[in-house]
Image (spheres, rainbow, N blue to C red):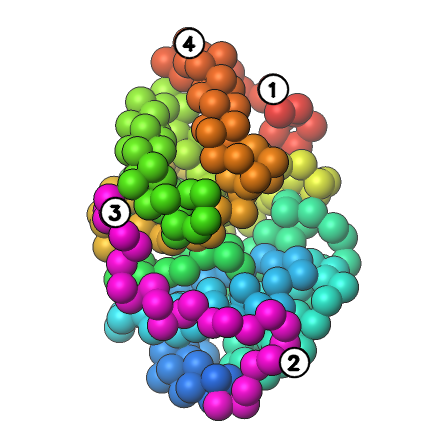
Amino acid sequence: MSIFNAPNWLDQFNFSYTSFDDVPQSTFDAINQDLDKLQNPEPLVSVVIPAWNEEVNILRSIASLAKLKTAIPMEILVVNNNSTDQMQKTLDQLHVRSVFQPIQGWGPARQMGLEQARGKYLLTADADGIYPPEWLDEMMAVLQQPGVICVCGRYSFIPAPGFPRWVLSIHESLKDTLATARHVKRPHLNAYGISIGYERKYALKIGYVMRKVRGEDGRMCFDMLQYGKVKLVKSRKARVWTGTRTLRVEGNGSYARALWMKVGIELRRLGGIFVAQAPHDTKTSLNE
């Protein structure tokens, strides 16, 4: 994890386009050339990306996934979650499968991807994530271990004005330490859709929550504990990178506010993370 700068390999995905109309055909052609070499019509692994109004971000995400270095047969599937921008036009120019989910929400979008995926295994990705070349192999190396049913990856933030890299790295170190502590009794709390994986047939038995509520990935992970173990993927080669958009939303544009809000939430939960969560109906439970 870089302390002062984001890794240089991210620069190739730093497209300056602001809309689909700005993207030249040459960019699509270059990405498609990589996609054609990468994907397999009979995948062992499906990488599923739910997306809503991400006509530019989805290009960055898919371009990074197209650079994956793997010999594992795989496919990329994008779920258009009722977008109102030009994202579908972007998808139509790329050599990836896409499906449409009219029901708004993270759970319904992921459920559609789960149902439409072709692989035995499913890795989830986000439209605003930038994926390192070794991500898929590192995730699969842990997921295919005996007794493992679900894996949770880690992520870092790309620096932006007001969010210097050295400060973000401190945030990430605290976040990773907390994740290690949570993993002992509540590993499902480390499941974030930007980087998780599981065996598809078990996920189909469970299904995602079909209403618009956050934590759909953690709910799925919690229910999968009945079938096996959940493991953290700690390899730096599997660390995904994303923008500071979520931090800005949490803190209304202020990093300090976002950090202290997060710290406050985690401190209130601190005692509970060392006690296993009781069985409950994840489809109707509230986020508390």
Alpha carbons under labels 3 and 1: distance apart? 35 Å
Query: Few, some or many C-alpha atoms within 10 Å of disc 2 (few <14, some 14-19, many ≥20)?
Result: few
Residue at (51% x, 20% y) in the render: 265
**Does 12 appear in magenta?**
yes
Alpha carbons under labels 4 and 3: distance apart? 33 Å
Residue at (76% x, 53% y) in the render: 103
Inspect the image, locate mark 2, and give the three-letter code of the amino acid beneath it: Asp
Between label 3 and label 2, give the one nearer the viewer.
Answer: 3
Closer to us: 14 or 30: 14
Circle 1 sits on which residue?
A: 288
Residue at (44% x, 38% y) in the render: 191
Q: Give the range drawn in magenta.
A: 1-26
**Circle 2: element type:** helix
The image shows residue 147 at horizontal and vertical percentages of 29, 40
Alpha carbons under labels 1 and 2: distance apart? 42 Å
Circle 4 sits on which residue?
A: 271
Q: Judge from the rendering whether residue 108 lies leftward or rightward of residue 278; answer left or right.
A: right
Inspect the image, locate mark 3, and give the three-letter code of the amino acid beneath it: Phe
User: What is the number of the mark on residue 4?
Assistant: 3
Upstream in sequence: badge 1 or badge 2: 2
Between label 2 and label 4, give the one nearer the viewer.
Answer: 2
The image shows residue 66 at horizontal and vertical percentages of 39, 74
